[in-house]
Amino acid sequence: MNAHDNERIRKQLQQFLPPMGDTGPERDLWPAMLQQLESKRGTNPIEPVPSVWAWGSAWFDGALLAGLVALVAIFPSAIPVLLYYL
Amino acid sequence: MQNGASGVLNLFRQGDAAAFETLFHQHQRAVYGWILRVTRNPATAEDLTIETFWRIHQAHARFDPSRGFEGWARRIATRAALDWLRSQRTENERSAEMPVEPASPAVADAAVTAEIRLKTAQAFTRLPPKLRVAATLAVIEELPQKEVAEALGISIVAVKLRVFRALRLLRKDLERQGITP
């Protein structure tokens, strides 16, 4: 197929199937979206991703555990006190 | 401090329902318009807009706020439209139906008959969906190839190749029917 054929069929397509252009919906689709969410909610629940705060909590837990291990290593006599409170 | 837009995107990523609603209202027109360009059917475009936002809702955890929402939504919309075209292809082969908008008198070529117009539209629906989408966006809608490539998730060279193959197949199909473009 040469460039001339290409251009002719291109023009024919544009003539018979005119561009749709930038068109919006005739109505607000949010109510239909809500209906979709409601109907599928039970079958496919969404798990929220861990938030930044959740990652921060994990970091804090790790630091607390490390501190306890260090305390026990330096002051072994504190073990009975810790066991009492745990 | 993050501004309002990036705040909404971050909240959406975390699964916030209000942020999703905000993004829906901000982008429903663009998503609908994009799907309409591919499917050329307003009722289907409405259904697929809902389907696209459903997929967006389900994929919120994979969204990268730093890359923007519009392009991501457009790629998902393109995939939804492609899935629909694939599902319709068999049906189209049976009925050979496609909504054909009447060309305005100003652009219509008087020498071209309605039969040729119909056969061209039908031959277009018989194209493989991937080629048809590329040709629709690049040839009929005359969108920049870069934009088409991004929406389809392929390179610009691949877009050119798909358009070339689509036009060649279309020409062969029309020639088999005795129509020389």
Image (tube, rainbow, N blue to C red):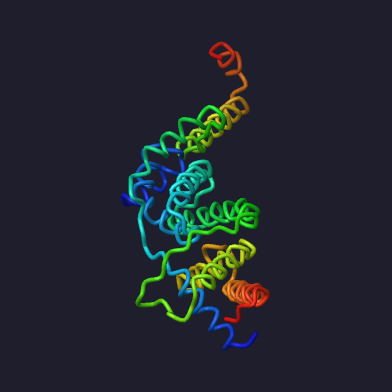
* Residue situated in front as seen by the camera: B141 or B19: B141
Q: Residue at x 62, y 74 (%)?
A: B174
* Residue situated in front as seen by the camera: A22 or A38: A22
In this rendering, the answer to whether B163 lies above or below B97 is: below
Q: Which residue is drawn at 37% across and 43% down?
A: A29
In this rendering, the answer to whether B55 lies above or below B179 is: above
Residue A30 appears in which quarter of the rendering? top left
Residue B155 appears in which quarter of the rendering? bottom right
Measuring from the top left, give residue B135's x and y in whole percent: 55, 70
* Residue situated in front as seen by the camera: A27 or B107: B107
Measuring from the top left, give residue A25's x and y in whole percent: 36, 51
Measuring from the top left, give residue B38's x and y in whole percent: 50, 60
Measuring from the top left, give residue A59's x and y in whole percent: 52, 37
- Residue A6 in sight here: yes
- Residue B67 in sight here: no
In this rendering, the answer to whether B18 lies above or below B150 is: above
Q: Which residue is drawn at 50% across and 35% down?
A: A48
